[in-house]
């Protein structure tokens, strides 16, 4: 799988060049929620213009005890990735090293990549800091940091529904992408190379504001 080097075209410049003030429409199939044994993504979402909302501020601690605030990364693109190591849709990307490749490609371009663990204690995908550090080592994760969100406050603030659920924030702190990691809704790694990776598409400067996420439901506390 090859990822293009991001051009980081400013959002307004993209709008001007394309002569549009709304998000590009994606295929009907991409707007349909995935229903599976792991939970449903919300249905009926259109990729329509809602402006460029301010990304929700947050501060979380990473697996090494270091606090990270979204405000710390003003002036950079930030990717938020909801992670659950027990989810087959997450393993789809991590087991063959595709998520790590994507993380490395863009962190080398000064993108901040934050994987957020919102699974509640006692639920699938919850680990303490030491547990996550072992997973980081075992999977050779290339994210900037994994942030612990045990109470799910940040996940709920972003309405994160699935793992993976992807958010891209521009250098001005605006939310420019919210949705699926790619265009093929399956848990099979064999499908990755045939899919459009939406995160790469957005980081490369293409206008794409919202798609329907797919994967396992985020394991929030009840």
Image (tube, grey):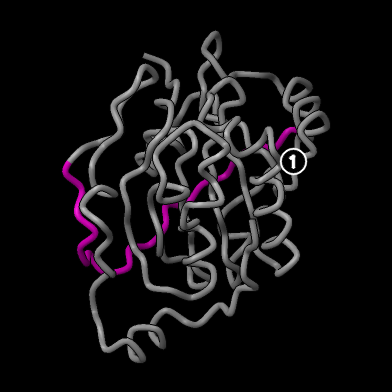
Q: Is residue 22 left or right of residue 12?
A: left
Q: In this figure, which residue is indicated by the disc labeled 1?
A: 141
Report the front residue among 72 and 52.
Answer: 52
Residue 167: x percent and y percent?
46, 52
Report the front residue among 85 and 221.
Answer: 85
Outermost residue on the left side: it is 44
Quarter of the picture containing the C terminus is top left
Residue at coordinates 64% horizontally, 56% vertically from top-left?
A: 1
Residue 221: x percent and y percent?
42, 16
Residue at coordinates 57% horizontally, 66% vertically from top-left?
A: 77
Q: Is residue 7 above or below residue 92?
A: below
Q: Is residue 189 above or below residue 131?
A: below
Residue 103: x percent and y percent?
67, 53
Dominant SS type (magenta): loop
Q: Is residue 166 left or right of residue 2?
A: left
Q: Specify start and end residues of the magenta stretch as a single range.
A: 44-63
Q: Residues within 10 Å of mark 1 (few under 14, many from 20)?
A: many
Residue at coordinates 40% horizontally, 64% vertically from top-left?
A: 176
Quarter location, residue 60: top right
């Amino acid at each position: 799988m090859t990822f293009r080097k991001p051009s980081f075209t400013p959002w307004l410049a993209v709008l001007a060049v394309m002569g549009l003030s709304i998000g590009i429409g994606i295929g009907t199939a991409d707007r349909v929620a995935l229903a599976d044994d792991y939970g449903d993504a919300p249905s009926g979402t259109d990729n329509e213009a809602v402006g460029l909302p301010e990304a929700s501020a947050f501060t979380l601690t990473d697996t090494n005890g270091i606090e990270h605030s979204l405000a710390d990364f003003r002036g950079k693109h930030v990717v938020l990735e909801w992670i659950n190591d027990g989810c087959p849709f997450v393993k789809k990307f991590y087991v063959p090293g595709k998520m790590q490749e994507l993380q490395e490609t863009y962190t080398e371009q000064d993108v901040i990549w934050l994987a957020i663990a919102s699974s509640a204690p006692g639920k699938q995908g919850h680990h303490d800091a030491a547990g996550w550090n072992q997973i980081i080592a075992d999977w050779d994760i290339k994210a900037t940091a994994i942030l612990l969100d045990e109470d799910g406050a940040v996940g709920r603030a972003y309405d994160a529904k699935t793992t993976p659920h992807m958010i891209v924030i521009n250098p001005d702190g605006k939310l420019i992408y919210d949705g699926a990691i790619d265009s093929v809704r399956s848990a099979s790694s064999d499908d990755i190379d045939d899919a459009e990776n939406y995160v790469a598409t957005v980081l490369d400067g293409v206008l794409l504001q919202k798609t329907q996420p797919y994967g396992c439901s985020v394991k929030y506390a009840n």
